């Protein structure tokens, strides 16, 4: 049996796991279905324009910095980044704008400008969430395999801060009287694909992380981080196979023993799944082998929303911040249309990245890129994207005029659209749910698929479909948790294997 650990998927979780496992001295192989690395954190390159396919906010670099350090690399030297200030502009459909800044005094002034009654509330919010993160960090950095893990001292001490009777939105209403400020510090729940009024109050730490540690733009985009990680893992001796989709998993009882791709068969007794959890289970693992995560359980699982994406290469450069979030005038209705009615909104919220104000490498001279994201329902019979795209595209282009992009149609030189159907068929995202499983209390901690996958032997998970959840910093953390579990299960690497590893790296 091969001692090589096989990883399915070269997304952020798979690449992080490869770095960590290789730094332990283990043999690692990555099998990636697509011709380039990154998964949902890859790049789109066409006609001289470069876009991030998915994430554009790079947050809380501490986790990835420590992963790089464990492999002997310096993140800041390997991936140049710019800290943004303002981090983004919030444009309220109800009226008004707020330039979000990591400078607390400036942020308090911004808040007082639009809501004098809420002066001082931001400082209180930051103080409380600094303590909340301190208490929850051990939980977010540890595996959860059963209900008994909830009895750890660190977990019990954090319970008073959990407030399960509060959502992110209701928690913020205890700080701010102006509903626009509640939305300004709760829209981050969309990083998890959830409404702030359904998302557990724990996740107020998402907004805190932005202001405490900053929002960064890696030169070349977040996809450039994935690309440099792929180069590093190969320098460390990891095999990286692109254009090689996995077609079959082989088990003896419930023990993984082999992986078959479109090219060959690889014996393995340790497998890390970074590909979409629900899609991988349904396609590659027979239902009778999955006691807990059966097809029936997956059908009953709540999944996140999806996104309608427009990637536009345009002539000229707009006078717009790097990131702008427009919040619909009737945000509650917009959320209901996405999560409950499963229909397209006439007045949607949307996000625009105007990255070339920071990074001129993303477009030819005299041009720039615009990345437009609109949260929409995941795949549902109510929306037939084969028919809806033309009209919804026109609506989105009309909507972004609210930000001053009045002559956009005339200036478009390149355009690509990605719908929930494309996420499903082109990127193998189950139901087109780009943020994976929802993060409600019934799908968190031990109730999420475990990092050491409970239904199979020798199989581990990384990425948004396992603990701790979605979002780049959290996905990187999942790789740290999983690599520690693998190290515990496989035991120390023999000196002979370590010498072989160093020899491979040297060559």
Image (cartoon, rainbow, N blue to C red):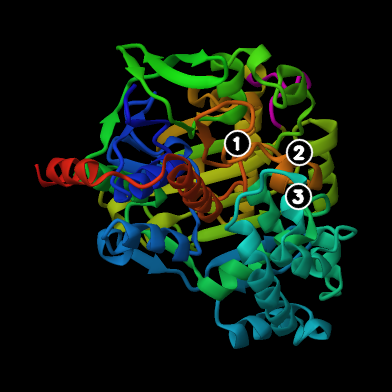
The residue segment tinted magenta is: 378-385
Q: Earlier in the sequence, mark 2 or mark 1?
A: 2
Task: Kindly check if marks 2 and 3 are in contact, taking CB atoms under 8 A apart as contact.
Answer: no
Q: Position of residue 339 (x, y in %)?
A: 80, 38
**Relative vertical location of residue 404 with respect to residue 157 in this rendering, above or below:** above
Distance from Cα at disc 3 to Cα at disc 1: 31 Å
Residue annotated with mark 1: 434
Q: Identify which residue, 387 or 247, lies in the foreground.
A: 247
Residue at the spot 84% in from the left edge and 50% down from the top edge? 332
Q: Is residue 200 left or right of residue 238?
A: right
**Relative vertical location of residue 318 with respect to residue 28 in this rendering, above or below:** below
- Other-residue count near label 1 (Cα within 10 Å), few / some / many at <14 / 14–19 / ≥20: many
Q: Main secondary structure of the magenta part?
A: loop
Q: Nearer the viewer, mark 2 or mark 3?
A: 3
Q: Earlier in the sequence, mark 2 or mark 3?
A: 3
Q: Is residue 423 left or right of residue 196?
A: left
């Amino acid at each position: 049996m091969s001692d090589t650990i096989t990883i399915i998927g070269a997304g952020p979780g798979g690449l992080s796991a490869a770095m960590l496992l290789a730094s332990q001295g283990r043999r690692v192989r990555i099998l990636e279905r697509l011709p380039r690395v990154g998964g949902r954190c890859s790049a789109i390159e066409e006609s001289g324009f470069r876009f991030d396919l998915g994430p554009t906010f790079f947050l809380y670099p501490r986790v990835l910095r420590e992963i790089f350090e464990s492999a002997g690399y310096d993140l800041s030297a390997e991936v140049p980044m710019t800290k943004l200030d303002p981090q983004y502009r919030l444009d309220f459909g109800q009226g008004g704008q707020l330039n979000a800044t990591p400078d607390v005094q400036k942020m308090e002034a911004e808040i007082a400008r639009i809501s004098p009654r809420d002066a001082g509330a931001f400082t209180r919010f930051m103080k409380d969430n600094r303590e909340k993160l301190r208490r929850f960090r051990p939980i977010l950095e540890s595996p959860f395999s059963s209900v008994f893990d909830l009895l750890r001292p660190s977990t019990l001490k954090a319970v008073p801060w959990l407030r399960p009777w509060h959502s992110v939105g209701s928690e913020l209403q205890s700080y701010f009287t102006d509903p626009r400020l509640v939305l300004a510090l709760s829209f981050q729940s969309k990083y998890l694909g959830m409404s702030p009024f359904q998302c557990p109050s724990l996740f107020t730490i998402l907004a805190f992380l932005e202001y405490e540690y900053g929002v960064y733009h890696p030169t070349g985009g977040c996809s450039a981080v994935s690309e440099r990680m792929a180069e590093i893992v190969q320098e460390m001796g990891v095999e990286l196979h692109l254009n090689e989709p996995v077609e079959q998993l082989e088990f003896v009882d419930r023990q993984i023993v082999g992986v078959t791709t479109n090219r060959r068969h690889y014996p393995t007794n340790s497998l890390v799944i970074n590909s979409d959890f629900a899609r991988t289970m349904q396609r590659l693992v027979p239902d009778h082998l999955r006691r807990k995560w059966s097809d029936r359980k997956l059908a009953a699982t709540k999944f996140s929303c999806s996104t309608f994406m427009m990637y536009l290469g345009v002539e000229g450069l707009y006078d717009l911040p790097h990131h702008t979030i427009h919040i619909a005038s009737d945000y509650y209705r917009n959320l209901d249309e996405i999560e409950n009615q499963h229909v397209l909104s006439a007045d949607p919220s949307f996000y625009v990245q105007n990255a070339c104000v920071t990074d001129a490498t993303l477009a030819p001279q005299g041009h720039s890129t615009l990345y437009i994201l609109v949260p929409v329902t995941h795949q549902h019979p109510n929306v037939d994207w084969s028919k809806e795209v033309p009209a919804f595209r026109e609506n989105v282009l009309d909507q972004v005029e609210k930000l001053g992009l009045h002559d956009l149609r005339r200036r478009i030189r390149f355009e690509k659209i990605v719908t929930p159907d494309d996420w499903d068929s082109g990127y193998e995202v189950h139901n087109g749910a780009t943020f994976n499983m929802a993060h409600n209390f019934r799908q968190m901690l031990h109730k999420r698929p475990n990092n050491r996958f409970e239904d199979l032997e020798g199989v581990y998970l990384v990425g948004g479909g396992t603990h701790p959840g979605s979002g780049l910093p959290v996905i990187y953390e999942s790789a740290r948790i999983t690599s520690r579990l693998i190290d515990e299960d496989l035991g120390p690497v023999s000196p002979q294997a370590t010498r072989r590893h160093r020899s491979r790296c040297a060559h």
